[in-house]
Amino acid sequence: MTTGKKATMSHPWSLSGHAPQAALQSQGFALLAPYQLQALAGVPAAVLADWLPQWDRLAPDAYLRDGGSYRSRRHGCFIQAFGSRDDLTLVPLRPHWQSTDYNALHGGIDRWFEPLETALSDDPRWRQLLCGLGKVFAGSSAGTWYIEAHQFRIDASEGVGRPTPEGAHRDGVDFVAVILVNRQAVKGGETRVFQAHGPLGMRFVIDQPWSALLLDDARVIHETTPIQPTGPAAVRDTLVLTYRRDGFQSAN
């Protein structure tokens, strides 16, 4: 983990008044309030209520190497052509792969997860969300994003749950969006963002559904601390979207 000066902020919405693109450019990350994400993606808050039950149907993650059973997930891949028009294509089911340079705990292996439900991947509002964020990350340029979507549930009902068991890390992509979907009956889960090549960092707890943390993966390292239960049905649900220009990560 990068060490050095760290600032603690409860909700650094808008990051000193910067637009998301400006914040990403100036410091490598931006934390969006729910209304900011909705405005950027053109997706109303009611959409989350429509999608939320899907997190109750995630499949157990069979690849946890810390011996835990606290994580469930689904996974899907998309290709977005961005520029003069948006064109989002669902890719046939493929494994999630990261090198050990980016994920020392789970890297170096093909991980096959259950696919996203078609009710999500075929939803026009889902496409709006992915393409809207893709435009933010692309700025004024044109090209192609290779997008991986991960639905996560961290369940702390039986003890500690670890949102990032691999610790502070980068993902090996260009940009990452971490969207909080639901958080209930838990404590902890502090998100920490550090400069990849510098001493500065920031930490905060994301606790409002539809909040989004946008990350320039080359410039910052991130992690979320473990969560503990404060009551029954103790869960933290997120949607993580990664955007990469040079194809999907693979062993070949």
Image: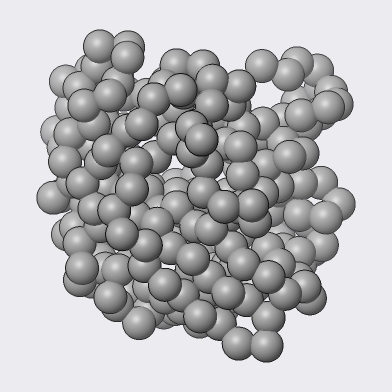
Q: Nearer the viewer, residue 26 or 45?
A: 26
From the top left corner, tell me how far across and down residue 4 is, in percent: 80, 18
Q: Residue at x 68, y 70 (%)?
A: 143
Q: Nearer the viewer, residue 124 or 47?
A: 124
111 relative to 78 in the view: left or right: left
From the top left corner, tell me how far across and down residue 234 is, in percent: 22, 34
Q: Residue at x 76, y 54 (%)?
A: 24
Any part of residue 220 in sight: yes
Q: Look at the image and tell me in which quarter the N terminus lies.
A: top right
From the top left corner, tell me how far across and down residue 50 is, in percent: 23, 71
Any part of residue 189 in sight: no
Q: Residue at x 25, y 41 (%)?
A: 113
Dividing the picture into quadrants, the one containing residue 66 is: top left
Q: Is residue 250 above or below residue 200?
A: below
Residue most extreme to the bottom: 84
Q: Is residue 50 above or below residue 124?
A: above
151 relative to 240 in the view: left or right: left
Q: Residue at x 29, y 53 (%)?
A: 93
249 relative to 15 in the view: left or right: left
Tally of marks = 0
Residue most extreme to the top: 67
